[in-house]
Amino acid sequence: MSVTATIRIQEADFDAAQEIAALTGGRTDIGAVVTFSGICRGSENGEPIAALTLEHYPGMAEAEIGRHADEALSRWPLQGLTIIHRFGRIAPGENIVLVVTASPHRQAAFEAAEFLMDFLKTNAPFWKREESEKGTSWIEARDHDDAAAARWTKS
Amino acid sequence: MRVKYFAWVRERVGVAEETVEPPADVRTVSDLIGWLSSRGETYAHAFEKPKVIRAAIDQAHVKPDAVISGAREIAFFPPMTGG
């Protein structure tokens, strides 16, 4: 059976437990589910922040995540895949991103989730702006995120 | 062609999107950045470090040497910080 990824770009919050249940409900063939939740921290570089605002490129965000989801489905024996990325204003403690992978055994689920997060960080068209007492500023991309994504393309 | 800007590139240019008609000798993404930069101070500021700028043609990432002919939509933005 071919697996189709569920991809949602939304302003609203999500419920990780509900998304897991949607993937696994009524099935007995799945042996492993890995979830990654990205959550808004209350500080950035040691400075407290009031909120993050995520800007995205509508259309390309779905397309780019879809391309990486297809690659994950071709590289690992996944039985289910859900990716949700929020945009808009997000307060500390709130969810930003969710990746859920399901497979018969844990290694594929772990690896695919990590692969997808590494590429979401560097290739999905989202930009974070932080609000703090000092005003607002765009968060800069980090070199170690590029390095994390690059290791999946090494031969 | 339609050009879109995101994040601080959008803020510096001052508009989120516009339609432009670059001359025929503007062949690549890199050429287009150079041509846009010549259109005024806000563009020059947005594109002052062209190596930092990322681009997409028709909603897929491209390199600076990508040819723009036939593109419907070209987007410029800083390195991404989602996830």
Image (cartoon, coloured by chain):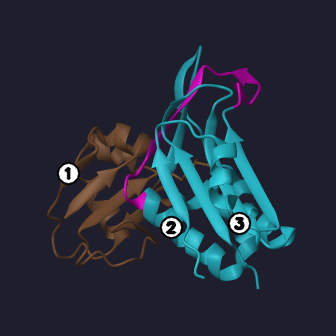
- Mark 3 and mark 2, same subunit? yes
Q: Is residue A134 visible?
A: yes
Q: Is residue B21 above or below residue A73?
A: above
x%, y% of residue B63? 46, 72
Callout 1, which amino acid?
Glu
Q: Which residue is mark 3?
A: A27
Q: To which chain does the residue with label 1 belong? A: B
For the N terminus of chain A, the image quarter is bottom right
Q: Which residue is mark 2?
A: A66
Residues at marks 3 and 2, CA–CA distance in whole angstroms: 24 Å
Please state which of the two labelled residues, at mark 2 or mark 1, is closer to the viewer.
Answer: 2
Give the mark nearest the N terminus, 3 or 2. Answer: 3
Residues at marks 2 and 1, CA–CA distance in whole angstroms: 27 Å
Q: Nearer the viewer, residue B69 or A40?
A: A40
Q: How many marks?
A: 3
Is A119 contained in the magenta span? no
Task: Assign a secondary structure to mark 1.
Answer: strand
Callout 3, which amino acid?
Arg
Identity of the residue drawn at 59% across and 56% down: A83
Q: Colour of chain A?
A: cyan
From which residue to which does the magenta span run? A41-60
x%, y% of residue A109? 77, 67
In this view, the residue farthest toward the top is: A133
Q: Residues within 10 Å of mark 3 (few under 14, many from 20)?
A: few
Q: Are marks 2 and 1 in contact (CB under 8 Å)?
A: no
Q: Is residue A115 left or right of residue B72?
A: right
Q: Which residue is mark 1?
A: B18
Callout 2, which amino acid?
Gly
Q: Colour of chain B?
A: brown
Residues at marks 1 and 3, CA–CA distance in whole angstroms: 49 Å
